[in-house]
Amino acid sequence: MDFHSHTMWSGDSTTTPEELRDCVAASGIDVLCITDHNAIKGALELVDELPCRVVVGEELKTHAGEIIGLFLEERIPQGIPPAEAAQNIREQGGIVYVPHPFDPMRNNLRSDVLDELVAADLVDGIEVLNGKTSLKSLNQKAVTYANEHDLAIGAGSDAHVAEAIGAAYLEMPDFGSPDEFLDSMRQGRAVGHYYDPPRRWRPRIVPSTAD
């Protein structure tokens, strides 16, 4: 399962639904979390369009860094405080997932804010393997943090181009509900490698991300 991916609805990705469909099939990924920046419209449209199960997510920008919500039904506005974002995710029955927690090149959540959210029991899991994090030590730091704070783990490609889908993923048991999903995360094993190919420029009409 790839926990972290982007499509053309993110604005900084050019991946079309057709490209995503082909690369998902080639990768063998059976579950894909589509986590566009501050948008869920693309994920909602693609739920029944890909040859894999789709989890609707959003990588939203707070004033202290990024947080991912999984199993969302409504878009969460960007720029709100991290605790409010986490509470909003929980109110939707979703999973609060912190991506690239120690990578300063990836707009990571500030360490003091991460600690505050964990202390308030507002974090369900963190990304311990990000396909765009070039330093293994940063991913290992996330593993250590997850173990120290009894957090579930996840892994994702953070793909902004279609061919990066599946570069990092979590091998985990099947699941039904978000609660079962969280239990499966705790039994998972992160697999993958660094893969951040350059994004070639091409003209593209960026779709609306409005609800």
Image (spheres, helix red, strand yellow):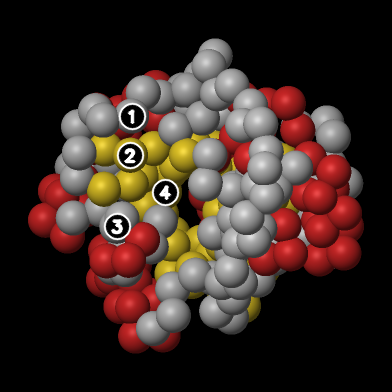
User: Which residue is nearer to you in this view: 9 or 171?
Assistant: 9
Q: How far is mark 2 from mark 1, CA to CA?
A: 5 Å
Q: Earlier in the sequence, mark 3 or mark 4?
A: 4
Mark 1 vs mark 3, CA separation in Å? 15 Å
Residue 103 is left or right of residue 169, and the answer is: left
Q: Mark 1 vs mark 3: which is more N-terminal?
A: 1
Circle 1: residue type: Gln
Which residue is the site of mark 1?
78
Residue assigned mark 3: 108
Q: Secondary structure at mark 3?
A: loop
Q: Is residue 206 left or right of residue 114?
A: right
Pointer 2 with pointer 3, Cβ within 8 A: no
Q: Quadrant of the N terminus?
A: bottom right
**Is disc 1 placed on a helix, strand or loop?**
loop
Q: Position of residue 136 (x, y in %)?
A: 41, 85
Please give the name of the residue rendered at 39% of the width and 76% of the height, measured from the top-left corner.
Answer: 139
Q: Residue at point 47% right, 39% down?
A: 37
Q: Position of residue 196 (x, y in %)?
A: 56, 72
Give the mark, 4 or 2, whose residue is nearer the N terminus. Answer: 2
Which amino acid, mark 4?
Tyr
The percent coordinates of residue 28 (x first, y second) are 84, 64
User: Label 2 belongs to which residue?
Assistant: 61
Q: Are marks 2 and 1 in contact (CB under 8 Å)?
A: yes
Distance, label 4 to label 2, CA atoms, is 13 Å
Which residue is denoted by mark 4 in the rendering? 97
Mark 2 or mark 3: name the one nearer the start of the chain. 2
User: In the rendered structure, which disc, 4 or 1, sits on the residue that comes first in sequence?
Assistant: 1
What label sits on residue 12 in the rendered view? none
- Nearer the observer, disc 4 or disc 1? 1
Front position among marks 4 and 2: 2
